[in-house]
Amino acid sequence: MAIPHPIPYQGSKRRLAPVIARHFPADTHRLYEPFAGSAAMTLHAARHGLAQRFVIADSLPPLVELWRAIIECPAQTAARYRRVWQRQFATGGEHFRVVRTRYNRDRDPVDLLYLLCRCVKNAVRFNARGEFTQAADRRRHGTHPDRMQASIEGASLLLRGRVELRCGDWQRTTADATPRDFLYLDPPYLGTSTGRDRRYHSQLPQQHLIDGLAQLRGRGLRFALSYDGSTGAKVYGPPLPGHLGLLRLRIDAGRSAQATLSGRRERTVESVYLSPGSVPDVAASGASSRPSSHASTGGATIEVSKDIATSTA
Ligand SMILES: C[S@@+](CC[C@H](N)C(=O)[O-])C[C@H]1O[C@@H](n2cnc3c(N)ncnc32)[C@H](O)[C@@H]1O
């Protein structure tokens, strides 16, 4: 059965999740997803029994509240989404703007869900005041309420009773992780999230990330991190320094939809960095590797040539 995904979110790891999950240790007690967004890795891991308990966390408060509403009150949340969605046919073209203004005043999580479903490329954009600024995609109505209800109920069934929701900076929300746990980190990429047109509501300076990762290593924690990547010749973010002792996999994420729309045949390659203690399941990924020992890897690269577009079908 398909994994339910109630929150459409640009940057979601929904398609890559099966490949990234191959590197999760088999004995994971709690899976932390401190940059959760749509929590694609948590949903995948919960469906496939890859951890016993889960921590979903993000620094955007209404997003965390949306997860709470989905997991704890699925029927009411689906019904509220249905009402907001249906009103667009009664009030016409202004509806998106009305909901956006209301969201920026009240920060209602169900309004955020509607905005995510209806906005251009499902891509959150915020101004310096933290207000949602993305425009409506006029060609779509957003996820149909029947489908949304099924996704919300499915996600609630998967996660209820075994997930803890936290709001805040990733270092704070992972402060109690232990070496029995596993962390999947997916911070905003440098190069996609800075500047005036901000993807996500907050940015993460690379040095802050590097210092935080060094601390995780010092605590003996196991983690996987999605970080830099490239589409064609465009590179997002510099690679992480070798002194962190992480193994870098490069995953072919398939053809870039954005580039295809612009008539270019470019592929997206994403980096996943693994701490010692994760499973470098390189053979299963059809990869060639150099060198394979964590002790000497530094910033070593393992090329993973699997094409996600075909492997997750
Ligand atoms: C690339 S998205 C994560 C996408 C996610 N993996 C998914 O499957 O949808 C990054 C997320 O990190 C959050 N974020 C940004 N800075 C953060 C910080 N310092 N601590 C925690 N979360 C942060 C953003 O709100 C955003 O939801």
Image (cartoon, rainbow, N blue to C red):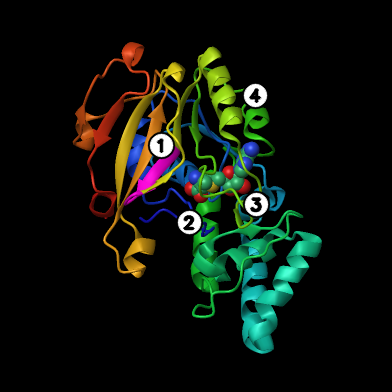
Local SS, label 1: loop
Amino acid under label 2? His
Sort mark 4 into few (<14), some (14-19) or many (20+) by Cα contacts within 10 Å.
few
Taking the magenta stretch, the answer to whether it contains residue 204 is: no
Q: Mark 2 points at which residue?
A: 5
> How far apart in space, not on screen, are marks 3 and 2 (Cα)?
14 Å
> How far apart in space, not on screen, are marks 1 and 2 (Cα)?
17 Å
Sort mark 2 into few (<14), some (14-19) or many (20+) by Cα contacts within 10 Å.
many
Taking the magenta stretch, the answer to whether it contains residue 228 is: yes
Q: Which of marks 1 and 3 is nearer the N terminus?
A: 1
Q: Name the residue under label 1.
A: 49
Q: Where is residue 281 in the image (x, y as percent from the top left)?
A: 27, 29
Q: Earlier in the sequence, mark 3 or mark 2?
A: 2
Local SS, label 4: loop
CB of mark 3 within 8 Å of CB of mark 4? Answer: no
- Residue depicted at x 67% and y 81%: 87
Q: Is mark 3 within 8 Å of ligand 1?
A: yes
Amino acid under label 1? Gly
Amino acid under label 4? Ala
